[in-house]
Each structure stands twice: as C-alpha cells, then as structure tokens.
Image (cartoon, helix red, strand yellow):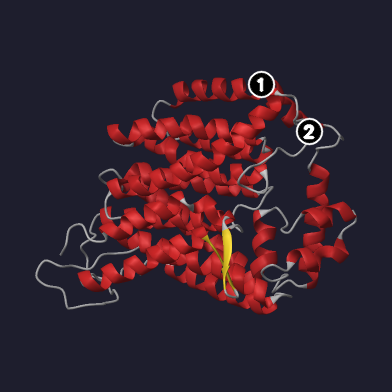
Amino acid sequence: MNPSPYRLTTFACALTCALAPAYVIRWHIGFYPTTLLESAILVSLAVFVVELVLSHEPLVWRGPFVLPALLFIIAGAIAVVAAPNRTAGLGLYRAYIIEPIAFGLVLANVIRTSRRAALVAGGLAAGAAVAGLANSFVVLSGLINHTYDVALTPPVVIYSTANAVALYVVPIVALAISVALYGSREERFGAAAFVVAGTIIAALSFSRGGYLALAAVVLGAVVLHRRRLLMLGVAVVGLAALAVVPPIRHRILIETHNVYGNTIQSRIDLWTAAVKLIRHRPLFGAGLSGFQQMSAPYYTHLHTAANFIDPHNIVLNFWVETGLVGLIAFAWIMVVGFQVSWRGWRQGSGGWPAYHLGVLLALVAVVVHGMVDVPYFKNDLSLLFWILIGLTCAGRQWAAPGSDAQVPTLRTGLAPGPGRSSRRTG
C-alpha cells in the first residue's frame, strides 16, 4: 500500500478550501451557472478519481455519517420537487448538498495524517483571512473617517453581508484555537496568528450572533483545558476588553433598546412567519429556494419579507428548506459529529486530537450562531460544514485504535496485496 496516496488531491483540496469565499465570482458556461469555488471543487473531485483509479486504493465510505448523509441527500431531492422554482432549487441542491458532501467524502479518504489536516486547515485560514481582513479594512476605514454608524449594517467587500463574515470565520477560529493549544510546535504559531486575526475580523463584523458564537467557543475551549481557571481568567479579560471598545459596546447595546438597528423584533417577525408556514406545510416546508416567496403571506411587517430569504434559525432553516426529513437528517449528522469529534479528542492518537476538538468547537459555533442566523445555506458555509465533518471522519479513520480491522469498502482497482488492509471510515 502506498503510505502517502492522493498527494495531488490533498493539495487540490487545500486550494479549494482557500477558495471557499470565491463563490462570489460567478459566470455561465452556456446555460449553466457556476462559480470559481464550484470549479475548484470539481477539479478536486476529478483529481481524486484519477488518483483513486491509478493507486488501486479502496474508496473508504462506510461509517456513522453514511445513513444521515444519505437521508439528507434524499431530503434535499424531495425539497427540489417541493420548491416553487425547481430550477433554482436544483441549483441550491447541487451547491449546498451534493458537492459539499462529495468533497467531505474525498477529505475522509485523502487526509491520512495530521500534517495533511494542517494543510487543509491552513487553506481555510488563508481564505478566511483574505476575505475577512478585506471586509475589516473597509469597516475600520469607515470608523476612522466617521462614515460608518454602527447602528447601520456594516459595509462589505467580498460578502453580501457582514454577518456572513462572522458565520464563516468564527468556526475556523474555533479550529485554530484548538490547534494553537494542542497542535504541534510548528502548527501552534500559525494557528495562534489566525486566532488573533480571526478575532479581529469577527469583532469588526459587528455580528452580534458572531460575538455570541465566539464567546461560546472560547468558553468551550476553557472548560476543556486542564488549566481552566487560569484560562477562564484570561478569556474573561480578553472578551471584556473587546466588549468595552466603544463601537462594539454600542453595537451590542442596540439590542437592549427599541431603536433602529435592533434586530430582535425583525427576528421575531421572521420566526413567526416561518412557524406559520410550517404549520401549513409541516412535511415539505417551502422547498429549496422557496422561503422568501412562500412566506410572504405570513408577515406582519412588510419590511421583514423584503430582507430575508431564510428564517435565520438553524431549526427553522432546515425545516423550511429541506422539510421535516431534512431537519431530522441534519440533527442526526450534528449528533454524530459531536460524538465522533468528542471521542477523537478524548481517545485519538498522534496529532489528531487537536483537530477533533477543533471540529467539536466549530460545531458549537455553528449551533450557537445558528440560533439567530443561517449557518449552512450558503456556498462557503455548506462546504465548510462538510470539511469539518470530513476532517473528523479522517481522524477517526486513520488514527483510531483498531483501524486495521477489515470492513467492506468499494474497490476500484486490483485486489489488495499483502499488507493492504481496509479501514474503518467515519
């Protein structure tokens, strides 16, 4: 067996991770709309298929995520049929479900060492830093020149909203925090640098959901650290220092007053409309891409209907977009994700525990921020989610005790020679 197969695929995947924010670069090939990110994903998949065939490696695919992922795929297909615009629904199905899951499967096969995991994490950090710092520079310029009022939506460069910056960056900060604490000496420096940069990016996004998610991640990292009391003191001082910065403090306090910029009332209107829609369509929801159109009759304030294309709550998002089956499937995936990453953190070997814990903390960020926003239904966010799942799958597969146990895999080449064994997947 080749001890280091899929080298080209690994580099292609790392580059794809760096290009996740590049979904904003769009074009058409004839009638087919695509993005730079989708092109990178498809190139990675193609390189993987070529190396898979040439190496005669088994395709590893079985594990605890298989059934919930298949159910999620089926729910997505049903959601396309249920959507008022099936063409748009099919496009989202491809971009949010099929391609990210396929990419996660590739990662589970090719990321066979923690060094490769570091390469993928580095790609994520590089892309997030470029996109995030560009947006932060514009916000900072506005604050310095007094052209931006924090009661208003922050300006953006790459993303369409500042919330999208925090939704993407904070889970990667979570991964970086874990690597900075528990990774190898070489990994810790780069991870710590991104923790600093990512925290600044999240702070200047002025996303209150992002602040809450970042606080939850820091709290989780502190609680799990053996020097938790010391870490708690450092974390409290750091978060308090950020909270007293005048623009950040004002942005947070807006939510306690009935003034322009307060998002609580609009969220309540949005959630109320989503619940009314679900009552009328409890099994299928609105279908992929259908929420904005099908929820319009249920609003009490017209401005809310004009501003949101999703319910901005993780439970309502999946129920509305993929129906009750999709909600159940995603909840199942999340539960398995927490279980696998927790076991990997507690029982993993080599350099993998740092990445398992990073995935665990990133999933915490997804859930916490998802209480008030949309942490999955964007090109970069859906890809990021399945990258996280792919990483913890890879750690389970290639570093778990007893990983040489024989399990069924899909053969794509010759029968294994002496010493070749199948491995468990996750």
The answer, for residue 105, to whether it is visible in the render is no
At numbered mark 1, what does the secondary structure look like: helix, strand or loop?
loop
> Which residue position holds label 2?
151
Q: Is residue 195 above or below residue 89?
A: above
Q: Position of residue 44 (x, y in %)?
A: 38, 63
Q: Is residue 55 left or right of residue 364?
A: left
Q: Position of residue 322 (x, y in %)?
A: 64, 69
Q: Earlier in the sequence, mark 2 or mark 1?
A: 2
Q: Position of residue 57 (x, y in %)?
A: 23, 69
- In front of the other: 378 or 369: 378
Q: What residue sits 61% from the left and 67% below the top?
A: 92
Q: What residue sits 69% from the left and 39% below the top?
A: 155
> Which residue position holds label 1?
245
The answer, for residue 253, to whether it is visible in the render is yes
The quadrant of the image that shows the C terminus is bottom left
Task: Name the kind of residue labelled 1 in the image.
Answer: Val
Q: What residue sits 66% from the left and 21% below the top?
A: 245
Q: Quadrant of residue 286?
A: bottom right
Q: Which mark is residue 88?
A: none
